[in-house]
């Protein structure tokens, strides 16, 4: 009798297919990371020990502002406690040349109702608390959303925590389960997939790198691809050097992204969709054709 085989997780299948990472980051210009200990559900903001009314109000206040809310917790065990605890909160803005990270501590999440989400999304600093100069790495471990995130993400966060203290947190869903372990580096907003503890340590030490990068959350998907393509072509990983001022959808399909450098150089990058082999976008989902974004052309422009 043949033994029953357990299906591979979505991350293993995506890795076997060598599904590209570029252009798969969440899209948001600012991030609000709120400490919420204990377990998280699939929709973590409304399925945790965070008061349901508070969660609903925060979701309403942030909608359409360019601020994405994630819950964070310290790496390690997560006792199912309901008692109030002081919470660390971070607010980050990701636009190149205007990145910043702020931190505060609150005793009641309702205090966040006073945050001007519109100005936070637009990049106005000084809205939350004390400026933070250190980089912050949020590693997705939301197993109720996708088991690959827990199985692959938690060991990475746990390995990084002893040497990096408050620079490393577990976080809720940031997209791209099939690329687990996934992480986002703040304040730049560059997201990563197929992470390792060694790669995480390098990100915290030196900032964004091109290896295993999914894109900068500041830009839409085609802009993420264009940003990474230009950086790879010129060998520049300075997060403040390259920007994507516009992404135009073309009538015949695809996109044309304008990319600029602080030294005056500029490029036009054509990006198109490619349909790849079917794979599940998340564990338990039916396989669907993989839609990836490829660079069709990269030309200098003046």
Image: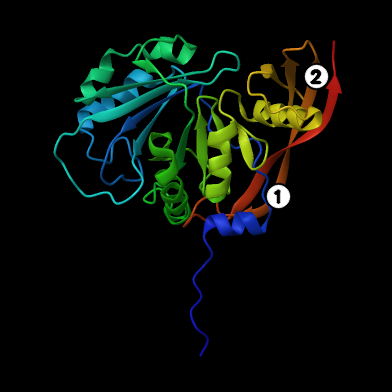
Q: Nearer the viewer, residue 156 or 297?
A: 156
Instruction: Specify the quadrant of the image occupied by residue 165.
Output: top left
Q: Would you say 184 lies left or right of 255 here?
A: left
Residue at the extreme front of the image, as rendered: 163
Q: Secondary structure at mark 1?
A: strand
- Residue 138: image x %, image y %? 45, 37
Residue at (59% x, 32% y) in the render: 206
Q: Residue 228: where, in percent of width, then height?
A: 70, 31
Give the left or right position of residue 225, taking residue 190 as reference: right
* CA distance separating discs 2 and 1: 27 Å
Circle 2 SS class: strand
Give the residue pinned by disc 1.
276
Tell me the residue that label 2 is attached to: 267
Q: Are marks 2 and 1 in contact (CB under 8 Å)?
A: no
Q: Residue at x 27, y 24 (%)?
A: 105
- Closer-to-camera residue (120/96): 96
User: Where, quadrant-wise, is the C terminus in this rendering?
Assistant: top right
């Amino acid at each position: 009798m043949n033994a029953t085989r357990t299906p591979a997780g979505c991350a293993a299948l995506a890795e076997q297919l060598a599904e590209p990472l570029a252009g798969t980051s969440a899209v948001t210009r600012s991030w609000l990371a709120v400490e919420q200990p204990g377990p998280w559900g699939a929709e973590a903001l409304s399925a945790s020990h965070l008061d349901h009314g508070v969660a609903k109000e925060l979701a309403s206040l942030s909608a359409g502002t360019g601020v994405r809310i994630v819950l964070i917790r310290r790496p390690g065990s997560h006792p199912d406690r309901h008692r109030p605890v002081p919470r660390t909160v971070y607010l980050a803005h990701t636009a190149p040349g205007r990145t910043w990270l702020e931190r505060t501590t609150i005793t009641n999440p309702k205090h966040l109702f006073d945050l001007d989400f519109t100005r936070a999304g637009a990049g106005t600093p000084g809205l939350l608390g004390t400026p933070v100069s250190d980089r912050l790495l949020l590693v997705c471990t939301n197993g109720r959303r996708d088991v690959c995130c827990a199985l692959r993400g938690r060991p990475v966060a746990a390995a990084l925590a002893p040497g990096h203290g408050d620079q490393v947190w577990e976080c809720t869903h940031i997209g791209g389960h099939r690329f687990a372990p996934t992480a986002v580096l703040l304040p730049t907003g560059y997201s990563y997939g197929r992470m390792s503890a060694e790669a995480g340590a390098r990100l915290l030490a030196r900032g964004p790198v091109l290896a295993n990068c999914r894109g900068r959350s500041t830009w839409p998907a085609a802009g993420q691809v264009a940003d990474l393509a230009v950086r790879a072509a010129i060998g520049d990983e300075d997060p403040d050097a390259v920007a994507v001022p516009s992404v135009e959808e073309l009538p015949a399909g695809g996109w044309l992204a304008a990319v600029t450098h602080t030294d005056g150089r500029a490029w036009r990058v054509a990006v198109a969709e490619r349909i790849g082999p079917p794979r599940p976008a998340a564990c338990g989902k039916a396989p669907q054709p993989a839609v990836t974004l490829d660079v069709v052309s990269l030309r200098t422009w003046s």
